[in-house]
Amino acid sequence: MNLSLDEKLELLSGKGFWRTKSFDGKIKHLVLSDGPHGLRKQVEGANNNSAEPAICYPTASALACTFDPGIVGRIGDELGKETKEKGVSVLLGPGTNMKRSPLCGRNFEYFSEDPYLAGCIGTSFIRGVQQNSVGTSLKHFACNSQETHRMRTNSIIDERTLREIYLKAFEIIVKNARPTTLMASYNLVNGYYSTENKWLLTDVLRDEWGFDGLVMSDWGACSELTKSVKAGMDLEMPDSHGVHKAALKKDLEAGLITEEEIDRAVNRLLALIDRCGTTDEEEAKHIIPTKEEYREREETKRRHRLAYEAAANAGVLLKNEGTLPLKGDEKILIIGDLAVKTRFQGGGSSHINAVEYPNVLDCMKAEFANVDFAKGYDSLRYDFDENMEAEALEKAENCDLILYCGGLTDLAEGEGYDRTTLLMPENQIHLIQKLVSLDKKIVFLSFGGAPFVMEGLERFDAVLQMYLGGEAVAEAAVALLTGRENPSGHLAETWPLHIEDTPAKNFGSREFSVPYEEGLFIGYRHYVSKMIPVQFPFGYGLSYTDYEYSNLHVAKEENGYNVCFEVKNIGNRVGKTVPQLYVRNAMGDFKRASLELRGFEKVSLNPGEKKEICMKLTTDAFQIYDVNVHDWVIPEGEYGICIGKSVEEIELSETVFVNGIKDLHLTDPLPVETPNDGPRFTVTSSIAELAEYSDLAKQILEQGIAAMRTRFPDKTDEDPEVKMMLEAFKDGTADSAVLFSGGEIPYQTLLAILDEANANYPA
Ligand code: BGC
């Protein structure tokens, strides 16, 4: 392609929010849309939540609970088809960051605390999408584990923890699914912005893992194109209105970057455009349907059924003392605002404009004759309402069973901010404390993107956790409650008992640097190795039938072991179970989790049926990353091959002796931070921190907040969409705040602010 130098420089920044440049049709362009669990195709300039109508599948935290790469692949396939139909080139997802803490506001968009599970689920997702000749963007690479301060936080992590935990799921997916693109995250990793991190983007991603696709920035994550392109990033998103291009051009003239380096990025972009780019004419063929038109389409109905199937596979039965499945003749009182405003997705860039999302109350009424309802609490508030509570308590007098619908509300979690507590919203705690004192059966139908402390758990007769299970979550929940579907979801993350028990003690820190002091020990690796009791362990999930595991055989093979065993359905219902293969590690003079997930399978069984399951265990299952030699090694010793129903319920085990390195000694110190000897404030400082030392920044902060508020006249500051925008403006980099203003704040103003703030900062 014959592009001038100027065009090449232009091409490295997007056009508007969602496209790349085409130079008036000279080349095709890319259309990029969020992701991940549906398609959020947004008209340029529109508010976040007003995209084209689309199907909303279960969010990642729910999808992972299916432990079923098969259904995830089918969802990927339908998503890929919808991406294609809507004229989109790249679906921005999936997200596969590790859940360092249950409090991360965006955990609902991530699969798991375990890299192997996240890697397997993510691989199927991407293969499914990409078989439709459209691309994906695996995100947020890397170590984007908190939302607080998300555009400027510096994740300090030792290399072994990076390799074994935070990069591992990315590695599995890159090698097995070959995503067309990766999205470099906002944060820094060990002192370098991900978008400027050569070690991450070139040495590891490309040279070691063989990634040959494109790396784009997260939206507003690139503030110096020269550094980014040199590090291995190829496309900055969104448009930086010529500002970053001008700087790049100057750097090129000054010899700070070469034309070859620019060509390298341009060629990767052109290759992607060749693979899934589009033209204005092709785009124009796509007519945006009305909600009604969209709802009536055959494929919409088919996809809704798939969303239902996935949600039914994802729902996790956490407790059941015989109350479920419901018998059908109970007088049921449904309590809780979430029965009406049933949460099926989270807030932020993944918000899907779904058209068909029945709520729990309607689905229950369609199923049962004897159903009453009391709101009990307001999901858009934290304070309790005496009248609502009184109504619920009064109505409860006459019922046989309370179906309490609650959990995390929209206020509690979302993109751009973290939760500050593991507890449920206060008004729900207040109400539950009253409900549990009644002499009634209580079934808790639970929603939310992440674990929380279940108030009243010991008094509940049953608990069904649906996460944020997509648009058909209510239908699936009711089918599970009635027994039309048999629960088969298993937890893809641990539910801790107290926040004090969680491993990441400095989680959500607003300090610039966040040392990951707990290292390898996140999720079950922490709880199991240190024997800390939890509410529910990783891998846990009940069923309306029961399964028996027997006959474990471990046979040595050339590159590992063949692990076979039998699973029998010993109840009287058809069901699916998830046998999990854990390796009990050999220990030595190094830190290591006692057990690690190395295999799983979702198995469907008729009553009385028995199946033999075989899983291949390759030798990488025993490896650890040796930072002395910068390579993977196997510590020699005795390893346990364990088959469990969860990480805490090991049913079968056998010991094998694995040859490897004897007497391995490893220490994993956190990297030492390099002191910043430049000016105190730079373009990556936030407007909020600049405002403390610059009147001009203060003025812009106030005006920006006011302007943003006028865009959402009907919403409060606590609304997830508003909260995300405000956080990004106040706490993101000043560079992105200025560029996102689309010219309202001239770049020169930012430079003047920096001069003023640096001059006022005490020496
Ligand atoms: C999010 C990404 C998203 C992008 C575009 C960013 O703020 O972190 O996940 O894809 O916006 O909406």
Image (spheres, rainbow, N blue to C red):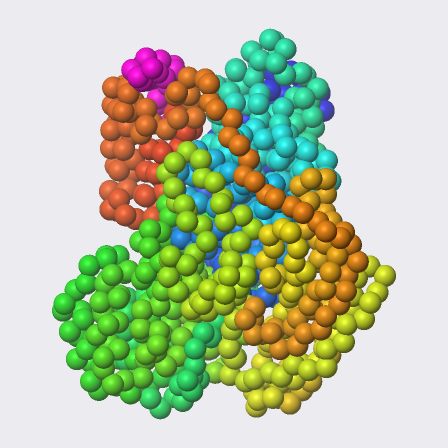
At 61% from the left edge and 41% from the top edge, which residue is drawn?
159
Q: Is residue 276 left or right of residue 506?
A: right
Residue 761 in magenta?
A: yes
Q: Write the residue at 60% across / 8% down.
A: 254
On the image, the x and y values in percent for residue 22 come to: 59, 28
Locate the N terminus and report the quarter of the image it occupies: top right
Q: Position of residue 255 (x, y in %)?
A: 63, 11
Looking at the picture, tell me which residue is in the foreground, 656 or 358. Answer: 656
Majority secondary structure of the magenta segment? helix
Occupied quadrant, residue 567:
bottom right
Quadrant into which the C terminus falls: top left
Q: Residue furthest right?
A: 558
Please state if 340 lies on the left or on the right of 244 as rendered.
Answer: left
Count of residue discs: 0
Residue 245 on image: x %, y %? 54, 19
Residue sitting at the far top: 254
Compared to 682, does 356 lie above or below? below
Residues in magenta? 740-763
Task: Note whether 491 is above or below 187 in the view shown.
Answer: below
For the point 23% across and 70% down, the residue is 431
For residue 626, say whether it is visible.
yes
